[in-house]
Image: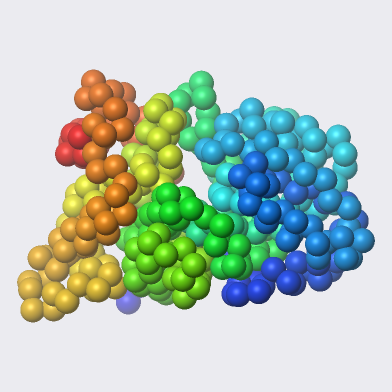
Amino acid sequence: MDNKIISFRSPHLILAGVGSLERLGEEAKALEAKKGLLVTDKGVIASGIVEKIQAPLKREGIVIDIFDKVISDPDIGCAEACIEMAKRDRYDLILGVGGGSSMDIASVASVMCTNPGTVQDYLGVNLVKNPGIPTILIPTTAGTGAEATPNAILTDIEAKLKKAVVSPYILPRVAIVDPLLTFSMPPTVTSSSGIDALTHAIECYTSNNATILTDLFAREAIILIGRSLRTAVANGNNLPARYDMSIGSLYAGIAIANAGVTAVHALAYPLGGQFNVAHGIANGLLIPYVMEFNVLGDIPKFAQIAEFLGEKAEQLPLLEQAYRAPKTVKAIYRDLKIPQSLTELKIPREAIPEMAKAAASVTRLMANNPREMTVEDIERIYEKAL
C-alpha cells in the first residue's frame, strides 16, 4: 500500500483532441477577455498558425497584439522584454502559442503583471503571491507539456544554469491541445520535443514523489509516445501518431505537475546553460545513462517501463527486465539519429567537474531521484556519456 497523501494540480480546463482549437474563441469570451497578448516565436509566425489562433478570437471581438521575440531556451532578458510589453499595454488575457519556450514566457509575463519586483525575485518554489492575468496555453509541439505544469523555465546566463519559477499560478486557466497544430513541426523538432516528452514520462513514473494517480498519466504517456515517436518523426502527416504524441506530451506534463522530474533534467541543465544544447537533445543523450544508474533504486518500475515500451521480457529475472528499459530507450533515440555522445556536441572532458557541481545544486530535482546521487556519481554518468 502507498502511504503517500495524493495531491493533484492541473489547468482549470483542458481541451484536448483533434479540432479542439475551435473552442478557443468561446473560452476566451468566457474569461471576459477584450484585449489579449499572443506570445510566440518567429517560427510559429512563419508557419501560419497564428492566423488560425487569431480568427476565432477576432470573431468574438477580442483585440490581439503579438509578441514574437521568444527565443529557444529563453533567458531572463527575453522574459523581461515580454513583461515590459504586457505591463505597458494592459492586457486582460495572455496566450502562449508554440513550444515550451513561448508558453513559459507567457506564464511568467502573466504573473509579473500582478506581482511586484523582478523575475529574479520569483526564481524558486512558491514565491509568487498573487494570481496572474488569465492565460490560455496552446502547444504547437508535442514535448514540454508546459501547458499543464506549474513550472516556467528560464536560462540564467550569469549562473550558466536553467532556473524555474514554480507556482500553481503558472498553471493556465485553459490549455488547448490540438494535434492538428503539430503538423507543421519538421522532423528535427518532432524528434527533440518527443524525446523531451518521453523523458518527462519516465522520470515522473520513477520519481520519489510519484503516486498511484501520477502513475496513471506517466504510464499512459510512456505507452503512447513509445509506440508513436518513431512514426511521427518519419511521417509527420500520420494523424494517429501526431495524436498519440500530443496526448502523451499532455499526460507527461500532468505527471510533472504532480510528481516532478528527476536527475536527468538536473544533469541536462548545465548542457543547456553552459553549452546551449537544446533541452530535448540533452535529455535524450543523458537519460539512458541516468536510467542505468537509477535501476537499483526501483527495480520493479524500471521493469514495467521496459514492458510499456514493448519489450517482451517476462521470462527474464526481474533485474534483467529492468535493465532492458534503458537499452530500449537508447535504441529509440538511436533510430531518431540524435547525438549519441557529449563528444558529438563538442563538450570537453575537462568541463565535467563544473557541470557535475552545477547539476548537483539542482536540489529541487535531485530530491525526486529514486537513487541518491553524489557529485562523483554525476561525474561518472557524464564520463559514460562522452
Which image quadrant is residue 335 in? bottom left
- Between 220 and 243, the one lying in front of the other is 243
In the displayed structure, would residue 238 be above or below residue 325?
below
Is residue 74 in sight in this rendering?
Answer: yes
- Residue beneath the point at 10% across and 65% down: 320
Q: In this view, does 354 lie above or below 235?
A: above
Residue at 22 percent across and 47 percent down: it is 289
Query: What's the residue at 69%, 68% (across, down)?
Result: 21
Residue 158 position in % (x across, y down): 51, 21
Q: Nearer the viewer, residue 130 or 4?
A: 130
Image coords of residue 319 (percent x, y): 11, 65
Q: Position of 90 compared to 365: left or right?
A: right
In which image quadrant can residue 311 be found?
Answer: bottom left
In the rendered image, the vertical position of residue 91 relative to residue 2, given as above or below: above
**Percent of width and height locating residue 128:** 67, 43
How many numbered dots are placed on residues in this image? 0
Using the image as rendered, state which of residue 257 and residue 74 is in the foreground: 74
Q: Seen in the image, is 205 located left or right of residue 18?
A: left
Q: Say whether residue 145 is visible.
A: no
